[in-house]
Structure formats: structure tokens, C-alpha cells
Image (tube, helix red, strand yellow):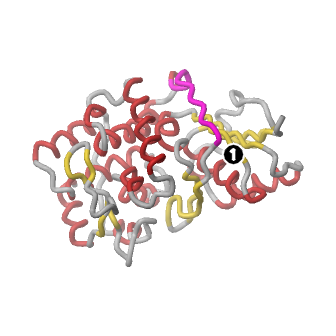
């Protein structure tokens, strides 16, 4: 039997499965190169080798951090994701994008390293706080906008959760290393990640991405009734509009998808369908276009 390292946070350590447990503080403050090094040092001191298995028991932060440790420890070890939040279930645990944050950007240091298995227990959602529900609901709304408009009607339903998981699995299987199609999963995330960074991660992922989706929807040039449908869905789920400023322009230029110093945005052709842009699934956006979009949502 493999030796198991269970990486979790302080709020979940009593619920975590058995194994050599490494506990980190909850939240984005742990998703750093410093905490990754601490975990690796603990594993080395305990004598774990390439034959070990890492268990990521937690939300998106634990998934990304533990998965990145697994990607580089002894040049790569096996890991299993056990997501405990809606966001991790429908998004972070699927697809193997693992990373830590850097001072100049979110998820800027990372790798592609899929887990051997993802174990989803929907019972864990019963005690989820409202803010954590909203984090995941934002991603479900995103799946509705890029693939299946029916998800906009009842994004908190078990049916919507399962459908969202299926959509992400389908997209990842078609484009594991994000060479084209998988970029559609970044809808709303260019502005969203910048907002998270500028708030020093006081804004939740869902709150920031919801605002990013408002901006991207406006830039997509949809019909007024389609834009109104998106806005109404976000409003109904409690996502407030967030003031934007020109400061965000500098942060967005460092986005991972940027090219030639210009951010690239995923845009909609219609609700449920992303523009292809010759297979790139995103296009470069100039500052003037961004500022115009900002003015329409503040």
C-alpha cells in the first residue's frame, strides 16, 4: 500500500482521511511558493519518496497547492482530489491545472498534473457557507454561458452541479493542455483574477469572476435581451457589481493568456456558445475597449 500524505487546512483536519497529515491555514494566503516549500520539506524530512500518494482534501486552494506539490515532488507523484466545496467539485479538481499565486498574478506558477482520481461526496455541500456556495455557483453560471444555457435557470440544483462537472470533463478531455478549446473555461476570469489580486484576495473567486463575466458579456456584443438575461441571473444569485478602475489594466496585462502586452478575452457569440476566433477561442483586447466595457457596468 502506498504511503499517503494528506494535505488539508485547519478547518477540515478533523474530517480528513487517515494518513500523514500536513495542515495549512485556510484561504489564498496559503497558496504560495513559500507554503509549497514548507510542505515539500515536511515530506522530505518524513522520508516520502516517489512511490507516495498525495491526498488533497479541501477546496480550490488545497487542490491547487497539493496538486502542484504532487507535480514537482520527486519529479512527480500520484495524487487524489477530494473536493469539499462546490467550486472545487465543479472546477478546480477537474483537469489537472495546479498552481500557486505570485505577487504579480494569480496562478502564475504552476503545471498540468491531473489527479489519478477525483472523489466527489455531495454530502459535504450540506454544511457549506453561503459565500462558498456562491463561489461554485459563479462557475456553474459560466458553464451555462459557454455551453448550456439551461444552467442559468437553477444553478444550485444537483442536476446543474452534475451537468457542470460533465461539461468540464468533456472540454478537458478534448484539450488537456489548453491549446485552444479549453480556453473557453476562462470566460470572465481575466478581469476576475485581476480583481482578486487587487483586493489582496478579500474578494472571493466567485464574486470576482461574476464581475468578470459582466464585463466579458458586454464586450461580446450580444443582443440587449441576452445581456439582460445574464445580468438578471447574476443579480438573482446575489452577485453585486464591483467598481472598476484603470488600475486593473496593468494587472490584466500580466494575465497568462496575454500576447504582445495585450490581454486576450474569451467572448460569447451567443448565450451557450463561445466565439472561435479561428480556433484560438479568445482575442486581444485594447485598453480603450476595456475602459468602454468598464463604464457600462459601473
Question: Where is the C terminus found, in terms of image quarters?
Answer: bottom left
Locate residue 290: give its quadrant. Answer: bottom left
Does the stretch in magenta take in 229? no
Q: Is residue 77 left or right of residue 166?
A: right
Q: Quadrant of the N terminus?
A: top right
Identity of the residue drawn at 55% across and 66% down? 103
Residue on which disc 1 sits = 24
The extreme front residue here reads: 174
Q: Position of residue 284 (x, y in %)?
A: 30, 69
Task: Kindly state the secondary structure of the residue where label 1 is placed.
Answer: strand
Residue 14 falls in image quadrant: top right
Relative image position of residue 170 (x, y in whole percent): 43, 41
Task: Please give the count of numbered marks on the rendered protein.
Answer: 1
**Which residue: 74% across, 59% down?**
75
Question: Residue visible at 47% across and 40% down?
Answer: 169
Magenta stretch encompasses residue 120: yes
Q: Nearer the viewer, residue 206 or 201?
A: 206
Image position, residue 187 (x, y; %)? 34, 52
Q: As displayed, is residue 159 above or below residue 293?
A: above
Q: What percent of the width, then of the height, locates residue 59?
A: 57, 39
The magenta stretch spans which residues?
A: 116-125
Amino acid at each position: 500500500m502506498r504511503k499517503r500524505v494528506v494535505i488539508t487546512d485547519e478547518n477540515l483536519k478533523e474530517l480528513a482521511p487517515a494518513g500523514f497529515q500536513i495542515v495549512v491555514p485556510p484561504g489564498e494566503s496559503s497558496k504560495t511558493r513559500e507554503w509549497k516549500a514548507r510542505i515539500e520539506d515536511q515530506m522530505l524530512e518524513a522520508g516520502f519518496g516517489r512511490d507516495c500518494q498525495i491526498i488533497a482534501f479541501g477546496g480550490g486552494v488545497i487542490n491547487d497547492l497539493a496538486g502542484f506539490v504532487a507535480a514537482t515532488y520527486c519529479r512527480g507523484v500520484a495524487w487524489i482530489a477530494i473536493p469539499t466545496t462546490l467550486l472545487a467539485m465543479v472546477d478546480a479538481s477537474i483537469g489537472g491545472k495546479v498552481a500557486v499565486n505570485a505577487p504579480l498574478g494569480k496562478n502564475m506558477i504552476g503545471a498540468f498534473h491531473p489527479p489519478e482520481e477525483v472523489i466527489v461526496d455531495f454530502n459535504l455541500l450540506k454544511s457549506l457557507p453561503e459565500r462558498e456556495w456562491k463561489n461554485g455557483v459563479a462557475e456553474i453560471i459560466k458553464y451555462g454561458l459557454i455551453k448550456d444555457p439551461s444552467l442559468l435557470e437553477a444553478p444550485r440544483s444537483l442536476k446543474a452541479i452534475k451537468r457542470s462537472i460533465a461539461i468540464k470533463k468533456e472540454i478537458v478531455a478534448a484539450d488537456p493542455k489548453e491549446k485552444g478549446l479549453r480556453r473557453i473555461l476562462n470566460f470572465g476570469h481575466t478581469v476576475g483574477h485581476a480583481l482578486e489580486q487587487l483586493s489582496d484576495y478579500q474578494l472571493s473567486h466567485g464574486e470576482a469572476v461574476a464581475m468578470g463575466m459582466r464585463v466579458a458579456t458586454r464586450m461580446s456584443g450580444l443582443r440587449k435581451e441576452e445581456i439582460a438575461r445574464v445580468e438578471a441571473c447574476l443579480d438573482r444569485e446575489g452577485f453585486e457589481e464591483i467598481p472598476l478602475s484603470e488600475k486593473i489594466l496593468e494587472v490584466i496585462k500580466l494575465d497568462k493568456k496575454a500576447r504582445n502586452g495585450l490581454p486576450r478575452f474569451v467572448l460569447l457569440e451567443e448565450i451557450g456558445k463561445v466565439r472561435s476566433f479561428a480556433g484560438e477561442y479568445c482575442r486581444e483586447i485594447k485598453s480603450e475597449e476595456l475602459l468602454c466595457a468598464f463604464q457600462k457596468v459601473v
